[in-house]
Amino acid sequence: MVHSLITGGAGFIGSHLTELLLRRGDQVTVVDDYSTGQPANLTQVAKHPNLHLIRSDLGNPDLVEELCGKVDRVFHLAAAVGVALIAKHPIQTIERNIYPTQLLLTALRKQHEAGRSIPFFLASTSEVYGKNPKSVWNEQDDLVFGATTKPRWSYGASKAIDEFLALASYRETSLPVVVGRFFNVVGPRQTGAYGMVLPRFVESARHGRPLIVHDDGSQIRCFAHVADVTNAVVKLLETPAALGKVFNIGSDTPVTILQLAENVRQIVNPAAEIRFQSYSEAYDDDFEDIRRRVPDLGRIKSTIGYSPTYDLPQIIRDVHQSQISVQNT
């Protein structure tokens, strides 16, 4: 039985990954401090005999070293999440993103030097591309951040440091590492509390409230279902050709935020109103956004044959049904 460690396993993506690995027959240890994740996300598997849940942050070197001595692979998903949280708490963002990654990699390198080679998946983000002006981003593109006086760039910069640490461990010690840059992963159990746009739109439409679109809504994004993403994550870590590489993970079908709002309104509540809000009202006066975020998926397609299976209407319906189910429980 493979023993997998998932950091942030009670979060949105982490909980889906936990369920996937348990279905595959893994023993799974989840570490989560519930800062953004929540126990309710693991309700369906809470009593599973192969699940061990530890409520803790990852700032304890002794705990990290102990866990890495027991597991066969590590999926590191714990991180600060959401534009709203990042804009308000940049110190927390930087510390939460970098220090645990450093501790995990140090512990894994010790295991590697002792003869136990433990594969490590690092969940990164499309935010690392920053303000790169290209219309489609591939993994070799430059990272273009804004000024350090703009707090939102602290997230992308800190995750880029995580990537440098992980890839340096691969280059210097041959530690088996895979980096995945997530592009707008969505699906059941995602909350809009931290600014995630799709669950926020669906919840507003369900309750007859206006769908709040920031700026003019012409920002372009690509939305991928969490089931497609978690399957890709596991397959990447099990594919030798993926080691030491960075992969965009998501959908490459672009949609504007205004079009997304209109699709949600059509599917969930045609009577819902769409309203516009400036960035300064939503965040602060110095907030900067990324106008277009579209991944080149060529590398992941050629490496593991990845292809998203959910289209946007399916995703919206799935999120809608999930919110209804939660309300009825």
Image (cartoon, rainbow, N blue to C red):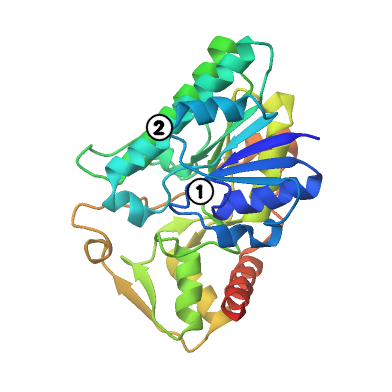
Query: Considering only vertical position in the picture, is 296 above or below 43?
Result: above
Query: Considering only vertical position in the picture, is 272 above or below 1?
Result: below
Label 1 – label 2 distance at C-alpha = 26 Å
Q: Mark 1 is on which residue type?
A: Val
Which type of secondary structure does the marked residue at label 2 adopt?
Answer: helix
**Tag on residue 294?**
1
> Quadrant location of residue 116?
top right
Q: Position of residue 256 (x, y in %)?
A: 46, 63
Which type of secondary structure does the marked residue at label 1 adopt?
Answer: loop
Q: Measuring 29% from the left and 70% from the top, which residue is drawn there?
A: 277
Q: Position of residue 228 (x, y in %)?
A: 68, 51
Q: Position of residue 217 (x, y in %)?
A: 38, 66
Q: Please tell me how crowded label 2 is: few (under 14), some (14-19), or many (20+) other residues with Cα within 10 Å.
A: some
Figure quadrant of the C terminus: bottom right
Residue at the spot of label 2? 98
Q: Mark 2 is on which residue type?
A: Ile
Figure quadrant of the N terminus: top right
